[in-house]
Amino acid sequence: MDAIYQDNDGSGQEALRAIRQSLLGVYPCHSLSFDISNQSWIEFFNGYFNDRVIPHFIKTWKLLSEGDLDLIIAEDKRFLELFDEQTSSNLSRASTEIFNAREGAKGMQMLKKLSLKSPNCSFTTAFSMQCSAFNIPLLQSIIAYAFMEWGCGQKSIRFSLENIGECEKLFDSEFPNFTDNIGRLLSQNLGGSKLTA
């Protein structure tokens, strides 16, 4: 856990700020890889999220630090192949939300290059790249991504920047110690790597 950026005061405000920043202008109108009609959040979290999403997020994070867009695109293609056709399609369609929201934003050159070279990349990769460009640390980026997965996968709950506080309370009440669980999964997946803020 020492290798991962943590919430300094324990209030969760840093994670909430990351969610707000990441959500700005981004709102997929369909599920990503989590869909509550197919599985529970706990099943998703212990399965796809732990086995597929977190390792991909970490790989993308590392490749971003190397600045190799071709390797990021190749990794993204492998990631999309892990899912069924519908889920891959959902993830690819949703990436346009990130590209449209960040078009012309300073510090988003890599994201713009990705949108030109691989417009059908996954939302997961585009989301990771925008978080990196915003200098949102890895732990907060994955928490924000998990919030997006959860929110988009709900069939009856919709969220916006105006009511994100209420959504955060609901998310936190449904999944207590979520930040600690994400931190634990990150530690397991990082192994000996030292990723810091």
Image (spheres, helix red, strand yellow):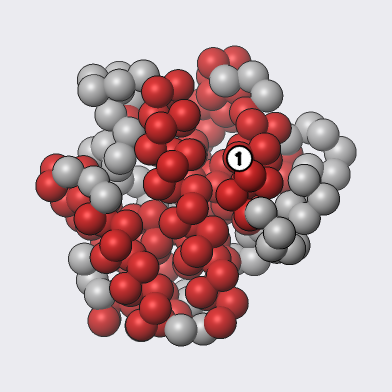
Residue count near mark 1 (Cα–Cα under 10 Å), binned few <14, some 14–19, many ≥20: some
Tell me: 169 left or right of 116: right
Above/below status of 83 relative to 44: below
Q: Which residue is mark 1?
A: 185
Tell me: 60 left or right of 93: right
Name the element at disc 1: helix
Q: Can you tell which quarter of the image residue 71 is in? A: bottom left
Q: Can you tell which quarter of the image residue 193 is in? A: bottom right
Above/below status of 34 relative to 22: above
Above/below status of 7 relative to 197: above
Q: Residue furthest left?
A: 85
Of the pair 31 and 105, the residue shown nearer to us: 31
Above/below status of 36 relative to 109: above
Q: Position of residue 185 (x, y in %)?
A: 60, 40
For image coordinates 54% across by 66% down, the residue present is 61
Of the pair 42 and 91, the residue shown nearer to us: 42
Q: Position of residue 93 (x, y in %)?
A: 20, 55
Q: Residue furthest top?
A: 173
How many discs appear? 1
Tell me: 178 left or right of 58: right
Residue 2 in view here? yes
Amino acid at dot 1: Leu
For image coordinates 85% across by 44% down, the residue present is 8
Q: Position of residue 197 (x, y in %)?
A: 74, 62
Q: Position of residue 40 (x, y in %)?
A: 36, 19
For image coordinates 79% across by 32% down, the residue present is 11
For image coordinates 72% across by 45% down, the residue present is 14
Q: Residue furthest right?
A: 9
Residue 18 in view here? no
